[in-house]
Amino acid sequence: MAFDWGEFLKLASDLVTKTDSADPSPARYRSAISRAYYSAFHRAVSYVRNVKGDDVPSDGRAHDEIWRNLRDSNRKEERAAGEKGYRLKLQRRQADYDGVDPQFHPQEARTAIDHATRIRAMLDNLSGK
């Protein structure tokens, strides 16, 4: 059985909502942003491959190509999903690689979760799910 990438979105939400107020660790929020991104990314990969019938690179280029594919679409909904995904990718990159600044807070993680949820819903709607 294939892994359900939506589980990453649930984990992201848990990391934010189940945070002990005595331990508001930025690591939780950074991890939540990353998990939310990958939930949306893998849904987009599935959509582009299975619905649009387009190839997706199997290396790191996929992270740029997948959102570019959607942003360059003639369909308004695909362009919107691609734009949100691109912004989420930038946020994930900052959360995963920027160790100096900024400090991540619950609101940034909640925004990432919201964007990932919307991307997944848009793509599900477009594919008739």
Image: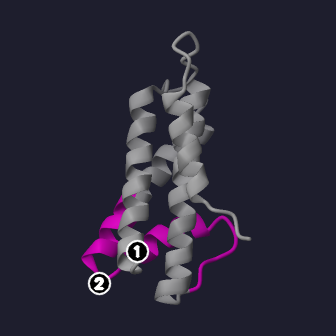
Q: Is residue 97 left or right of residue 90?
A: right
For mark 1, does the 10 Å Cα neighbourhood hold few (<14), some (14 to 19), or many (20 or more) residues? many
Q: How is the image coloured?
A: one colour
In-front residue for pair 57/117: 117
Q: Residue 112 appears at what percent x and percent y?
A: 43, 44
The disc at residue 24 is none
Quadrant where the C terminus sits is bottom left
- Classify mark 2: helix, strand or loop: loop
Q: Residue furthest left?
A: 76
Instruction: Check contact, mark 1 vs mark 2: CB within 8 A.
Output: no
- Classify mark 1: helix, strand or loop: helix
Quadrant where the N terminus sits is bottom right
User: Within the magenta stretch, is there residue 60?
Assistant: yes
For mark 2, does the 10 Å Cα neighbourhood hold few (<14), some (14 to 19), or many (20 or more) residues? few
**Image quarter of residue 96:** top right
Identity, as a three-letter code, of the amino acid under mark 2? Asn
Q: Where does the magenta region start and end?
A: 55-84
What residue is drawn where x is 35% and y is 73%? 125
Residue 2 visible in the displayed image: yes
Q: Is residue 111 above or below residue 16?
A: below
The disc at residue 70 is 1
Q: Residue 46 appears at what percent x and percent y?
A: 56, 75
Identity, as a three-letter code, of the amino acid under mark 1? Leu
The residue carrying mark 2 is 74
Q: Is residue 3 left or right of residue 25?
A: right
What residue is drawn where x is 39% and y is 67%? 82
Q: Residue 79 appears at what percent x and percent y?
A: 32, 72
Residue 71 visible in the displayed image: no
Q: Is residue 73 above or below residue 30?
A: below
Q: CA distance from mark 1 to mark 2?
A: 9 Å
